[in-house]
Image (cartoon, rainbow, N blue to C red):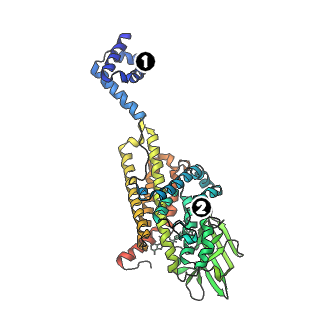
């Protein structure tokens, strides 16, 4: 017996030198079974070397060294200056430490995690692009977009909460409010002392809201009376201010109002059975003879065109959210496929898996480059509707495809919400439909490139 081992050890030493002693001992352990010994006994040096080579490959497969996971292959964040990069890093830390550990639990419960708000406020990321005189920081749209990606990468619901407050509600006041209104409301909202919501969609009118709005406002002296219903309104169950859009019974034009949620006649009813963005508190709002002072009417919102101005910027924001959602799904999936073993090796090692992963990453990278350029155009003050709509369509379609491939690559575990990808998969559905469905945003693009409106 000892002769055989001497022989093996001798050959091993020759092949790999003294430095490989650990491997020899591994092999010796493996070969301690009597039948293996009898098999090895008659092997020549070449066969032994072949055997050892195979053993090394198996060992390599079982414990491969995985490269770091990076869903930003073209390094879009490096477009930021160092001080903005530092803000982005703070957001990343907050999301990983405060939101990631509880996101799945709250998503399943359908509740909003109010405990994250104090640290969220400390980030100081609301109204980043606003003028300093209203409490803003005059930062770039690119930074704002990358922050959206970073938040959605961990939890899309948190990003939607943020987008409704800092985008839809605050932008309504920033674009359509008078100077006095901006001074009164924006600083409190930037500090998140007051939270906003945006009420445009109605139970029977979604895409056609510009033409078919049924909520009315009627002026009597310096008081307006609002009647109607709104549906899907994010943050509505707890927001302090709700921006309500209503059609003037006199001019038949759409007007906007900053309404306190506690106003008499305004009630909210939470929508419970969502399969997407379950952390976001969406509600049906009923307005029954709600009285609002003229001073609370957005002074620069005269027609639906002003509402659409708000939507243009937030559509760009939704495109960024879709990038974040897709990135989160891709990164979790890559991690999973490297850890999950089938047929004795990580599933990430199979050709078909790698083809899907490369497909996901190429789509994701195209989306990232598109939104980064969109924000640069926005920073130049040149972004037009069709550019925002094109990105919204491309990124939400891509997000849906990527989250679907993610689920596929995770097999049955992909449908478990605890494995995160199912949450992204569900959330992608809302991104696809809100702030203008895929069809409506495609029609915005179609109108611009053909000169013909095909909405009706
Ligand atoms: C999670 C979530 C959060 C939301 N948050 C808010 C919020 O905070 N505030 C708010 O005001 N709204 C909110 N919305 C509403 C959202 O903006 C609307 O859902 C969206 O505008 C689409 O309207 P709809 O769902 O009524 O679909 P519909 O308009 O009923 O459309 C149904 C289908 O018909 C298609 N369609 C409609 N018209 C055309 C056409 N001309 N040509 C081709 N196809 C067409 C649509 O693309 C869609 O596929 C939210 C929605 C969701 C899901």
Q: Spatial distance from mark 2 to mark 1, Cα to Cα?
A: 60 Å
Residue at figure coordinates x 44%, y 77% from the top left = 455
- Going from N to C along the chain, the mark reached first, 2 or 1, is 1
Up/down of 34 relative to 419, above or below: above
Q: Is residue 88 visible?
A: yes
Residue at figure coordinates x 36%, y 79% from the top left = 451
Q: Is mark 2 within 8 Å of ligand 1?
A: yes
Q: Quadrant of residue 186?
A: bottom right
Q: Identify the secondary structure beneath mark 2.
A: loop
> In the image shown, does 360 or 276 lie closer to the viewer?
360
Q: Position of residue 155 (x, y in %)?
A: 54, 55
Q: Identify the secondary structure beneath mark 1.
A: loop
Q: Quadrant of residue 252?
A: bottom right
Direction from residue 291 to residue 344 in the image, left or right: left
Frontmost of labels 2 and 1 is 2
Residue at figure coordinates x 41%, y 59% from the top left = 79
Q: Which residue is mark 1?
A: 33
> In the image shown, does 42 or 349 lie closer to the viewer?
349
Q: Are marks 2 and 1 in contact (CB under 8 Å)?
A: no
Q: Which residue is mark 2?
A: 280
Answer few, some or many: residues within 10 Å of disc 1's Cα (few below 14, many 20 plus, some between 14 and 19).
few
Quadrant housing the N terminus? top left
């Amino acid at each position: 017996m000892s002769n055989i081992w001497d022989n093996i050890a001798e050959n091993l030493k020759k092949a790999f030198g003294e430095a490989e002693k650990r491997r020899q001992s591994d092999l010796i352990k493996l070969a301690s079974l009597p039948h293996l010994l009898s098999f090895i006994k008659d092997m020549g040096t070449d066969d032994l070397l072949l055997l050892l080579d195979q053993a090394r490959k198996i060992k390599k497969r079982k414990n491969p060294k995985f490269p770091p996971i990076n869903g930003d292959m073209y390094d879009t964040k490096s477009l930021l200056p160092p001080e903005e990069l530092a803000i982005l890093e703070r957001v990343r830390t907050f999301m990983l430490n405060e939101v990631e550990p509880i996101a799945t639990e709250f998503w399943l419960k359908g509740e909003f995690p109010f405990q994250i708000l104090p640290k969220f406020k400390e980030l100081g990321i609301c109204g980043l692009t606003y003028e300093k005189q209203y409490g803003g920081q005059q930062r770039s749209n690119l930074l704002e977009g990358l922050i959206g990606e970073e938040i959605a990468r961990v939890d899309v619901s948190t990003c939607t909460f943020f987008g409704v407050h800092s985008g839809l509600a605050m932008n309504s006041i920033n674009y359509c409010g008078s100077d006095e209104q901006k001074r009164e409301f924006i600083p409190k909202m930037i500090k998140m002392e007051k939270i906003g919501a945006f009420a445009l969609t109605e139970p029977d009118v979604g895409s056609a809201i510009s033409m078919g709005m049924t909520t009315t406002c009627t002026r009597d002296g310096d008081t307006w009376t609002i009647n109607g219903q709104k549906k899907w309104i994010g943050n509505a169950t707890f927001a302090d201010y709700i921006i309500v859009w209503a059609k003037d019974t006199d001019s038949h034009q759409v007007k906007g109002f900053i309404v306190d949620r506690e106003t008499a006649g305004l009630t909210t009813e939470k929508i419970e059975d969502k399969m997407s963005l379950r952390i976001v508190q969406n509600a049906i709002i009923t307005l029954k003879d709600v009285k609002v002072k003229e001073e609370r009417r957005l002074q620069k919102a005269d027609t639906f065109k002003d509402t659409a101005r708000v939507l243009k910027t937030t559509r760009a924001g939704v495109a960024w959210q879709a990038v974040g959602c897709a990135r989160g799904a891709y990164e979790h999936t890559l991690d999973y496929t490297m850890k999950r073993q089938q047929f004795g090796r990580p599933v990430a090692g199979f050709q078909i898996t790698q083809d899907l992963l490369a497909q996901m990453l190429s789509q994701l990278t195209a989306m990232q480059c598109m939104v980064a350029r969109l924000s640069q155009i926005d920073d130049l003050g040149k972004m037009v509707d069709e550019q925002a709509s094109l990105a919204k369509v491309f990124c939400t379609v891509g997000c849906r495809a990527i989250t679907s491939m993610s689920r596929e690559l995770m097999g049955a575990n992909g449908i478990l919400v605890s494995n995160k990808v199912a949450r992204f998969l569900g959330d992608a559905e809302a991104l696809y439909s809100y702030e203008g469905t895929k069809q409506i945003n495609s029609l915005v693009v179609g109108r611009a490139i053909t000169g013909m409106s095909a909405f009706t």
